[in-house]
Image (cartoon, grey):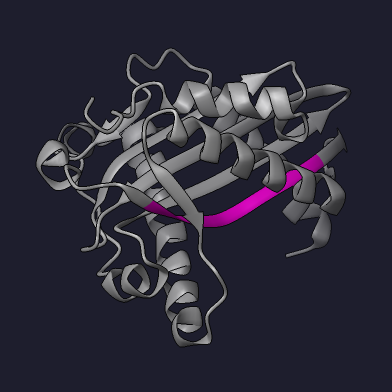
Amino acid sequence: MSAKKKRILLFLSCLSISLMVFGCTPQAYRIHPEFEKRARNFNTLGLMLCDVKAYEITGLGVVELRKGWCTTGKENLVSALVEGLRKKNYRIKPLAKDKEIEEEIAEIQAVYGAVNKSIQLHTYGPQLFPEKKKNFEYSLGSVEKILQKSGTDSLVFVRGLDHVLKGKEEAFISVAFVDSSGTILWYCEKGIRGEGGLRDPESASKLVENVLASFPGVGG
């Protein structure tokens, strides 16, 4: 596949996400049937920051990854998540680099990438499976070793996408909370338009606040 075709596909992918996230979705989050029982002991969350990408789209087929924007967006997203979860009485720890679990982390991130696409496709659309949304049950496989090594009791998977088209900016994030068995207990994806995107601390904080609004706090 040529580089131009890849850029066009990326643009169309961003457009698809826009329609999905900004559409009339009555409930933006997805929750496992046993959330309350399984998440009862959540306290220290390990941050699994999978991917934050920022693109400038100057026209159809002209898409450029801005590495500086990616770095800034990642920093703002982490700060906003730490603060947002602190307000809900959780502690969040970015996972430190550890050779003993390095390969396992890479594998679980790859699995999550595939599962994340399935969640978006089948519980948000366009290939909607109502049963998948109603009985939200997705698993990555056990993450017990990662939790033990990192001193956490659950993981938070986060992905961010930021793109600027003709001066107009849109940003999207998805957040998933996973227990030791690898079961995704809670998932939410939302976007924000016309502001500074993930590159702007206030905009990033607002987006994270919107996503976490429906996530129960400790004792909540």
How many numbered dots are placed on residues in this image? 0
* Quarter of the rendering containing residue 186: top left
Up/down of 109 relative to 14, above or below: below
Q: Give, as a single range, the part of the protein colored magenta.
A: 45-55
Going 51% across and 80% down the picture, which residue do you hit? 102
Q: Position of residue 175 (x, y in %)?
A: 44, 41
Of 32 and 155, nearer the camera is 155
Is 58 left or right of 153, judged from the image as shown? right
Q: Position of residue 98 (x, y in %)?
A: 52, 80
Going 79% across and 43% down the picture, which residue do you hit? 55
Up/down of 201 relative to 95, above or below: above
Q: Is residue 52 magenta?
A: yes
Up/down of 90 relative to 96, above or below: above
Going 24% across and 35% down the picture, which residue do you hit? 31
Is 1 left or right of 43, judged from the image as shown? right
Q: Is residue 63 magenta?
A: no
Report the predominant secondary structure element of the magenta stretch.
strand
